[in-house]
Each structure stands twice: as C-alpha cells, then as structure tokens.
Image (spheres, rainbow, N blue to C red):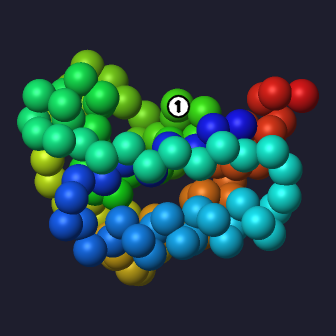
Amino acid sequence: MKIELLVFDGCPNSEPTEKLIRETVSELGGDVKIEVVTIADNYDAVARRFLGSPSVRVNGKDLEIEEDSTTTYSMRCRIYRNDENQSGIPPKELLIKAIQAARQKSE
C-alpha cells in the first residue's frame, strides 16, 4: 500500500497531517509506504491533480473527493469537513476508512 501526502512549502498543516498518517499506519499495522510530495507551482498542481495542501491519497485515491472533469487543481489550502467541524487536517476516520478500503480491494 502507498500513501501520498501532497503539500506545498509553508503549509502549516503538513507536519500534523504527516504525524497523523504515521500514527494511524502504526496503529493499523501492515506494509505501507508513505511518500511526501512537495508541489512546486500551479503547473505542478495541475499535472499531479493537486486538490490543495495537505492532500492525502491511499493507493492513488483521494481520502474524500471523487475527482471528475470539473475538479479544480491549484495551489491552495485544503479544508476537510466532518459533521460539524472544519479543519486543515483530515479526520482520522477518513484515513482509517481509506486504508481499510484499500486493503479490502487488494485481497
């Protein structure tokens, strides 16, 4: 399994999100490669389908957004929403759900 953390330099939520990923992977166990990808500019954002910093992909699939032809890729901060809250860090539940779905798919 591969988890990508896509960020731009200076994003205040990069480190807390990376910490969340590492803790969650440690708790769930298994063979997981974690890669931090720094997005350089808007051209890079479009080329890498960057949805904002920080973005997390598990085996190439974004944690929360189903991408389509109308998806906008650019250098921007990302906000995750769950029930009543908003945060620049994805909810742990989203990450767990994505990891579990990826594991089921590979079985």
Q: Find the residue positioned furthest to the bottom.
A: 84
Image location of residue 32, percent across then percent down: 72, 46
User: Where the C terminus falls, by quadrant?
Assistant: top right
Residue 47 visible somewhere in the drawing: yes
- Nearest the viewer among 92 and 3 is 3
Left or right: 104, with 41 as reference point: right
State the residue position of label 1: 60
Image location of residue 79, percent across then percent down: 29, 64
Q: Find the residue positioned furthest to the top.
A: 69
Q: Find the residue positioned furthest to the right.
A: 107
Left or right: 85, with 41 as reference point: right
Which amino acid, by three-letter code, is at mark 1?
Gly
Residue at 11% over, 28% down: 43
- Nearest the viewer among 8 and 24 is 8
Image location of residue 12, percent across then percent down: 26, 74
Label 1 packing within 10 angstroms: few (<14), some (14-19), many (20+): few
User: Where the N terminus falls, by quadrant?
Assistant: top right
Left or right: 106, with 55 as reference point: right
- Tell me the quarter of the picture where residue 11 sits: bottom left
- Nearest the viewer among 70 and 10 is 10
Image location of residue 44, percent across then percent down: 19, 31
Identify the secondary structure beneath mark 1: loop
Residue 82 visible somewhere in the drawing: no
Q: Is residue 21 above or below residue 100?
A: below
Q: Find the residue positioned furthest to the left.
A: 42
- Tell me the quarter of the picture where residue 96 sits: bottom right
- Nearest the viewer among 12 and 71 is 12
Residue at 78% over, 29% down: 105
Residue at 15% over, 54% down: 76
Left or right: 1, with 60 as reference point: right
